[in-house]
Image (cartoon, rainbow, N blue to C red):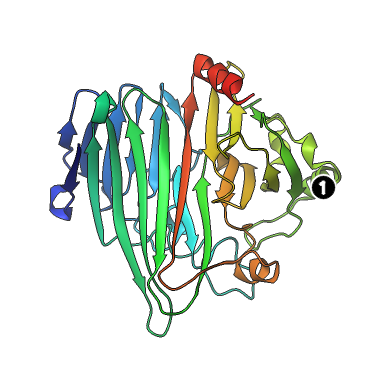
Amino acid sequence: MTIRIPLHRQIFSSQTTVLLSSGALTVTAWKYASGIEAISLENSRGHLIVLPYQGQMIWSAVFDDRKLTMENFFTEPQPSRDILGTYGCFMFHAGLLRNGCPTPEDTHPLHGEMPCAPMDSAWLEFDDTDGDAKITLTGEYHYIAGFGDHYRAHPSVTLRAGSALFDIGLSVRNLSGKPMDLMYMAHMNYAYVPQGRFVEPLGIGEIAVRTSVPAHVHPTEQWKGYMARLSENPRSLTRLETPEFFEPEIVSFLRDPGVDEKGFAHFFLEHPEGTAFYTRYAPREFSHATRWILHDPNYHVAGFVLPATCDPEGYLAEKAKGNVRQLAPQEEAHFSVQTGLLNAREYQIHLNAIR
């Protein structure tokens, strides 16, 4: 049985309010000093902090006392209509009409309109069918522009009892009478793990290093030399052991990952002590994937896989490559990712099941 709990802005204040407590799962609400509303989804292993009215981005993720979120200098989320104004979260929904790093000829903001979208509504769904308790935060964003695009998007995040894995989803329906461009990326900003190792048990068909330089990247001579070597052998980057070369960022495009019998690709960032960050997705939904690594004085991030419908090169570049998907009138697209933390035992179980 699923119980739906509507959320209203009036319940959010500087004081933490418990909205639900089932024993295995707890949901609390509050408002940051910046004025941004927050929801914490908690189980016995940790919690997610989600911003229900600001793109439903996942601001923070902590499980087994380990911070999953990138290092950054934002102490709390900030009100902003673009992601650069509050770039410190664990995950945001990038897109949907435009995505990626804009070229000088592009007119869209970095990663489009969805990351900080002002949500029209938000609600919780609690389900304990067959003793498998889970809580979902979801909502609706209605985008409409005169003589332009018109869509409705539903992001979601689901946490289960006793698990440090969680599901991130997004569905979008084109409400216009004309076809709509669609560019989407599940942009997960995982923590940088010194000596962490990239593991893809089913392999990757092709890895290519981004050679274009976005406007926000300022190359050094050391970086240029490393990039030249990496471009010749993109598969040589298997560990996070040379942070001096990860400033500015390293971006790689991952093509044709191997899939299991159910059509899922599996990616791990293995930690030296035997635990791992994990992401699973279906390439039938996400035709592209990106790897993003950065280690500078302000940001440490290891986005070991960012599933997407296109590369993050901006609208005009992706349009020229034929990577901008089209949604027909009234057509709906669905995307789902499972991600999170595996302890050492869980990691080995997952590896054995995949292999």
Q: Judging from the image, what secondary structure is the residue with disc 1 in?
A: helix
**Residue 322 position by quadrant:** bottom right
Give the left or right position of residue 135, taking residue 150 as reference. Answer: left
Residue furthest to the front in view is: 261
Q: Which x, y percent locates residue 7?
A: 18, 50
**Residue lying farthest to the left in this orientation:** 10
Asked whether the viewer can see residue 55, the reply is no
Horizontally, is 213 left or right of 38 in the view? right
Query: Which residue is more in the foreground, 284 or 310?
Result: 284
Residue 203: image x %, image y %? 71, 34
For the N terminus, the quadrant is top left
Q: Which residue was labeled with disc 1?
A: 231
Question: As shown in the figure, which amino acid type bears the numbered disc 1?
Answer: Ser
Q: Residue at x 75, y 36 (%)?
A: 237
Tell me where residue 312 appears, x and y as whole percent. 61, 58
Residue at the spot x=37%, y=83% of the render? 146
